[in-house]
Image (spheres, rainbow, N blue to C red):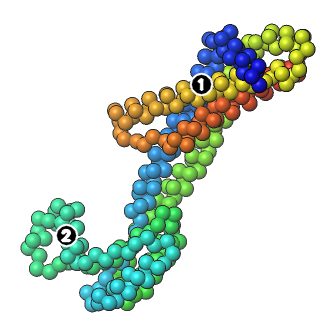
């Protein structure tokens, strides 16, 4: 293995331009995939941020008694998927409306009667913000006799979950397509590098070197080329991320695990493409 590593390094020294072009092609291919990952990750964050607003609001009658409200709060909190239940009094509802709606603040001071009802706001745990869970909790809240109305934006919520499903399917399809294109580009780049050194392979074959011994340096060289391409892809993606943040709008950087996976992908693609290219060439010699 040490000998193969030395030969792989010497291969970098003998043809730095060719190796550099191969690493550049690998880097550009992985950059396309990394940019898609950056977009997909921020789209997922945006959908999750909207999902956090999913809640059920139960509006209470004027005749609701504190004991009944407290019992309802405890029962609703015990339901599966419920994170918290908050009681909002009429005064709190009016104050919130004044803060969120400036036009109400202008004439609310002249009101003799508070028109806003008390309510119970029911929030859900992450992973439990599904149509079935929300509808089940809404039905349970409607069973209380002192609950006048229950709202949870059914149409809006259905569109949100539809958007999430569409985003997931699109990410799978486009991600797979980009990965396939990146694989083809990386494989082509490595095959060109191997073909350029066909004379070296032929001489090694003539002096009696076994196929495994011939393939090993190219395997390591392909892995190193893929690693360089992966590093280049991360740098290019980071530059794009900084440019978008500075000149367009704020986005989040992909998780460190994704960056590590990108580097590993470059190493694996480079090693496999190089090994397959050498094996195919050896069959024809």
Horizontal side of 62 relative to 231 (left or right) equals left
Query: 34 above or below 63?
Result: above
Horizontal side of 55 relative to 207 (left or right) equals left
Query: 228 above or below 99?
Result: above
Question: Whole-percent x and y of residue 25?
Answer: 61, 22
For the N terminus, the image quarter is: top right
Q: How many marks?
A: 2
Q: Which mark is residue 95?
A: 2
Residue at 72% across, 25% down: 220
Residue 186 in view here? no
- Residue 123: quarter of image: bottom left
Question: Whole-percent x and y of residue 239?
Answer: 44, 29
Q: Secondary structure at mark 2?
A: helix
Q: Nearer the viewer, mark 2 or mark 1?
A: 1
Question: Whole-percent x and y of residue 21?
Answer: 61, 17
CA distance for labels 2 and 1? 59 Å
Query: 238 above or below 90?
Result: above
Discs 2, 1 touching: Cβ within 8 Å: no
Q: Which mark sits nearer the N-terminus, 2 or 1?
A: 2
Residue at 17% across, 61% down: 102
Can you name the residue that lies furthest to the left here? Answer: 110
- Residue 13: quarter of image: top right
For the C terminus, the image quarter is: top right
Q: Which mark is residue 218?
A: none
Front-lying residue, 221 or 112:
221
Mark 1 Cα shell of 10 Å, populated few (<14), some (14-19), many (≥20): many
Q: Which mark is residue 228?
A: 1
Residue at 60% across, 33% down: 263
Front-lying residue, 263 or 86:
263
Horizontal side of 85 relative to 3 (left or right) equals left
């Amino acid at each position: 293995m040490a000998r193969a590593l030395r030969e792989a390094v010497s291969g970098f020294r003998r043809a730095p331009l060719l190796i550099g072009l191969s690493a550049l092609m690998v880097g550009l291919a992985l950059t396309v995939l990394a940019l898609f990952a950056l977009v997909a990750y921020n789209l997922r964050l945006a959908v999750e941020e909207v999902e956090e607003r999913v809640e059920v609001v139960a509006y209470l009658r004027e005749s609701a008694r504190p004991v009944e409200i407290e019992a309802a709060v405890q029962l609703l909190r015990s339901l599966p998927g419920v994170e918290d239940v908050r009681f909002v009094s009429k005064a709190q509802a009016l104050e919130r409306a004044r803060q969120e709606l400036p036009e109400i603040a202008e004439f609310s001071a002249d009101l003799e009667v508070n028109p806003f009802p008390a309510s119970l706001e029911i929030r859900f745990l992450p992973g439990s913000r599904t149509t079935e869970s929300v509808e089940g909790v809404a039905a349970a809240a409607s069973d209380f006799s002192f609950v006048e109305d229950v709202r949870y934006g059914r149409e809006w919520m259905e569109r949100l979950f539809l958007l999430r499903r569409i985003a997931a399917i699109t990410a799978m399809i486009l991600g797979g397509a980009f990965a396939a294109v990146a694989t083809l580009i990386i494989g082509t780049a490595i095959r060109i590098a191997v073909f350029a050194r066909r004379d070296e392979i032929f001489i090694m074959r003539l002096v009696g070197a076994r196929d495994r011994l011939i393939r090993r340096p190219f395997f390591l060289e392909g892995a190193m080329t893929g690693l360089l391409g992966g590093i280049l892809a991360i740098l290019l993606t980071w530059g794009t991320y900084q440019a978008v943040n500075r000149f367009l709008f704020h986005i989040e950087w992909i998780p460190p695990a994704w960056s590590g996976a990108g580097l590993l992908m470059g190493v694996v693609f480079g090693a496999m493409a190089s090994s397959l290219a050498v094996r195919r060439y050896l069959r024809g010699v």
